[in-house]
Amino acid sequence: MIKKIVINCLIIVSFSNILMAMDIGAYLAPKFLFEIEDSGIKKPKDKKNIQNLYVGGGIALGYNFDIFHKYSTVRLEFEYLYRNPVPGNAYISTIQTMQSHTFLFAAYYDYNFWYINYNNPDSARNKINGGKRPVMSVYGGFLMGAALNTYITKTSFEYNGIFQNNYYYNKVQFLYGLGVGVAFHITSLISLDLSYRLTFTTELQSNHDIIASLRLNF
């Protein structure tokens, strides 16, 4: 599914490049995630909680606003990510495993540096930066939204053998946090993002996310 999304995005970007280099404005960003989550369960004879691991991916839709000066950009973004648990995670006794969906709004401030010559009269970047475009940028931002967690419980009983039934229930959590990252602008339309962010739930459980994404301007 994610592979199809990436291919479609590349087609859209290639077509838009033929028409006009819209390197400021809307963008689409497929994302891939590795997460370390506080389980809320303490290790035996240890004060620290067990850390659960998740992998996943999703997509974000955002918009660039060049409203301060030529070296910076403000981005607003809406993101959906799916998190799949790694085998061996720890849960309370009534839960077998958990899957999570997050829906987050984010605001980022980018600072661009390391410029190269870029002669493209259709490029907004070319006009703002006097014939140059940035190759790298660093950014930080604030995130807020919600997580939809699907818990799978296990009930076993015996009747002419052992049978196992799984039951599901959902729980919504409020999320907020901070994120930092670095972007490599491969072309004026395609950027590779590597980021880290720390998010918290209302129960003050913390999540550490490492994310790689491909930002595609269109």
Image (cartoon, rainbow, N blue to C red):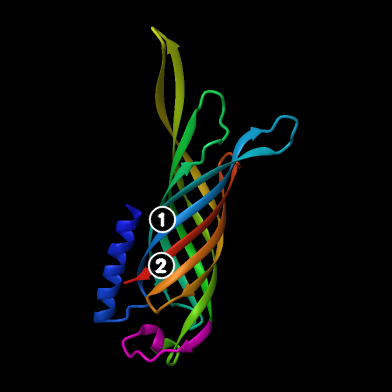
Q: Secondary structure at mark 2?
A: strand
Residue 90 part of the magenta-drawn span: no
Would residue 103 be found to the left or right of residue 5 on screen? right
Q: Is residue 169 above or below residue 84?
A: above
- Most foreground residue, 185 or 79: 185
Residue where numbered disc 1 is placed: 79
Q: Earlier in the sequence, mark 1 or mark 2?
A: 1
User: Which residue: 52% across, 75% down?
Assistant: 137
Q: Secondary structure at mark 1?
A: strand
Q: Position of residue 146 (x, y in %)?
A: 45, 46
Residue located at (48% from left, 83% from top): 70
Q: Classify 42 as above or below 120.
A: above
For the record, the magenta segment spans 114-126
Mark 2 Cα shell of 10 Å, populated few (<14), some (14-19), many (≥20): many
Query: Pointer 2: what residue?
Result: 215
Q: Nearer the viewer, residue 181 or 44?
A: 44
Judge left or right: residue 124 versus residue 153.
Answer: left
Q: Nearer the viewer, residue 94 or 127?
A: 94
Amino acid type at mark 2: Arg
Looking at this view, name the residue that lies furthest to the top. Answer: 160
Q: CA gap, disc 1 to disc 2?
A: 12 Å
Would you identify the image quadrant in which residue 64 lies? bottom left
Mark 1 and 2 residues: CB-CB less than 8 Å, in contact?
Answer: no
